[in-house]
Image (cartoon, rainbow, N blue to C red):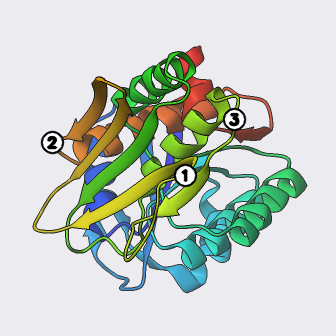
Amino acid sequence: MVRVAITGINGRMGTMVTDIVLAQPDMELVAGFDLAEGRQVGPIKVSSVKDIDKVLKAVRPDVLIDFTMPAAAVSNVKAAASNGVRPVVGTTGFDEAQKREMADAIKKGNVAAIISPNFSVGVQVFLKLLAEAAGGLEGCDIEIIEAHHNKKKDAPSGTALKAAEVISGALKEKPQLVYGREGVVPRGREIGIHAVRGGDIVGDHTVLFACDGERIEIKHQAHSRSAFASGAVKAARWIVAQKPGLYSMSDMVKQ
């Protein structure tokens, strides 16, 4: 039985992850954390995130699934790792210093962890296709356009940045990343990244390879957040069997 704790349990993603966890015959929800405490969720009452260290010590979950905000997620990862709990992090918007802080905590705690900007299995296939296309279309102009709902706070999305990283890794000549354009901006050796925010768009990512006389577009569209939530639950099940270290969704999909 995989013992699961969830941070941001009252949020949209936290609620969806909770429902999936409660439906799994091999998982048990043992703790939930949020700014607002006291709500009954399945077998547990939501605890204040201020008490995360104390509660983790008491209930000893196997994994902690986090969909919160960058600063909060860093603190949650540090608390989990110091208590021997494996973090599964779907929060996005981390800066490089925050990424290093989490990586250091995971190493110090000697736990397995998986941090991913997108837990959709389809997105992992999307990224593989991008790497293949970029390798075969060297010299073409590349643009990334992502669209999300009007409540998303970070831009560009973590998935768009991951797509740019994957494409850059497949190119011989490394491009510059350009975020939107305004004024006189002649195109150079670059990847343009553009963010759209509106309505209730769950998550769309399109990569355009514009070549002389032709173009290729590779697109992934999420119709529901359930794709991310179910992927995170699969990752929680997978990470308990891994050796200590920091993993990505691509590591999980390979196996």
Q: Nearer the viewer, residue 215 or 110?
A: 215
Q: Nearer the viewer, residue 14 or 61?
A: 14
Amino acid carrying label 3: it is Glu
For residue 223, the mark is 2
Residue 123, quarter of picture: top left
Left or right: 202 with respect to 195?
left
Q: Is residue 178 above or below residue 242?
A: below
Q: What residue lies at 45% left-to-right and 69% top-to-bottom? A: 68
Amino acid carrying label 2: it is His
Q: Nearer the viewer, residue 10 or 224?
A: 224
Q: Earlier in the sequence, mark 3 or mark 1?
A: 3
For residue 173, the mark is 3
Q: Earlier in the sequence, mark 1 or mark 2?
A: 1
Q: Which residue is mark 1?
A: 188
- The percent coordinates of residue 141 (x first, y second) are 44, 39
Q: Is residue 198 visible?
A: yes
Q: What residue lies at 60% left-to-right and 71% top-to-bottom? A: 55
Left or right: 63 with respect to 195?
right
Left or right: 193 with respect to 114?
left
In the image, which is nearer the foreground, mark 3 or mark 2?
3
Mark 1 nearby-residue class (10 Å; few <14, some 14–19, many ≥20): few
Amino acid carrying label 1: it is Gly
- Label 1: element kind: loop
